[in-house]
Image: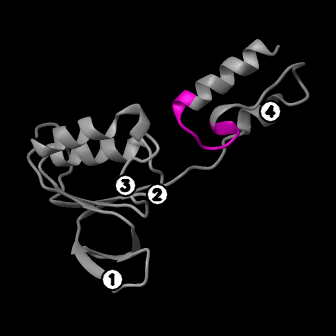
Amino acid sequence: MAGRNWQTRHAVVVDDSGHYETLGIAEQLVAEGADVTFVTPFKQIGFKVENALMVEPVLERIAYAAGRFTILLRHRVRAVSGDTIEIAPTYPAPSSHLPCDTVVLVTPGAPLRTLYERLHGKVSTLAIVGDANSPRDLQKAIYEGHLAARSC
């Protein structure tokens, strides 16, 4: 693990997006030897990329990696304190505490409209696409950009 300036033993990856980014982060941490607990409020991991056949290959690679991987579906983080994290199911049930020295939180982002706002009224044709419209994945942003270019 040369070249790293940090190391984690117990990582918790919190997926509130359902996209590939969280899977990639978990895979990297497990490959580096961390024990990873994947926490998501959804009923499956990576549900927004399941149709693109991205989930199974990640799970296969994780199965042969150095660390351990635990999935907690339909769970949320209640609190992070020191070297522990409190998690609870999304349904009424008792919470539990897990050891962690790293917490990675992946949530939907906010629209980035700075460039649009600077150009608005200064150019004749302007369209809002991709993350400037609302947080989304790359394929949708490319499609929106394609449609906007064709409509000019």
Q: Number of marks in the image? A: 4
**Residue 31 point in image, percent of width and height:** 15, 43
**Can you give x and y, in whole percent of width and height, for residue 95 in the image?**
33, 83
Instruction: Give the Cα separation between the discs numbered 2 and 1.
Output: 18 Å
Residue pointed to by mark 2: 16
Q: Are marks 1 and 3 in contact (CB under 8 Å)?
A: no
Q: Secondary structure at mark 1?
A: loop
* Position of 78 relative to 106 (above/below): below
**Label 2 environment density (alpha carbons within 10 Å; few <14, some 14–19, many ≥20):** some
- Residue 44 numbered mark, or none: 3
User: Looking at the picture, which amino acid does disc 1 mark?
Assistant: Ser
User: Is residue 24 inside the magenta stretch?
Assistant: no
11 on left or right of 21: left
Badge 4 is on which residue?
118
Residue at image position (41%, 32%) is 52
Q: Where does the image place residue 20, in percent across and percent down from the top left?
A: 39, 41
**Given the image, on which type of amino acid does mark 2 rest?**
Asp
Question: Does label 4 or label 1 sit earlier along the sequence?
Answer: 1
Instruction: Identify the image quadrant of residue 77.
Output: bottom left
Is residue 138 on the magenta stretch? yes
Q: Which range is magenta?
A: 131-139
Quarter residue 73 falls in: bottom left
Q: Are marks 4 and 3 in contact (CB under 8 Å)?
A: no
To which residue does mark 1 refer?
95
What residue is at 43 percent from the left and 78 percent from the top?
A: 91
Dot 3 surroundings within 10 Å: few (below 14), some, or many (20 or more)?
Answer: some
Instruction: Kindly report which numbered mark, 3 or 2, lies closer to the viewer in this rendering.
Output: 3
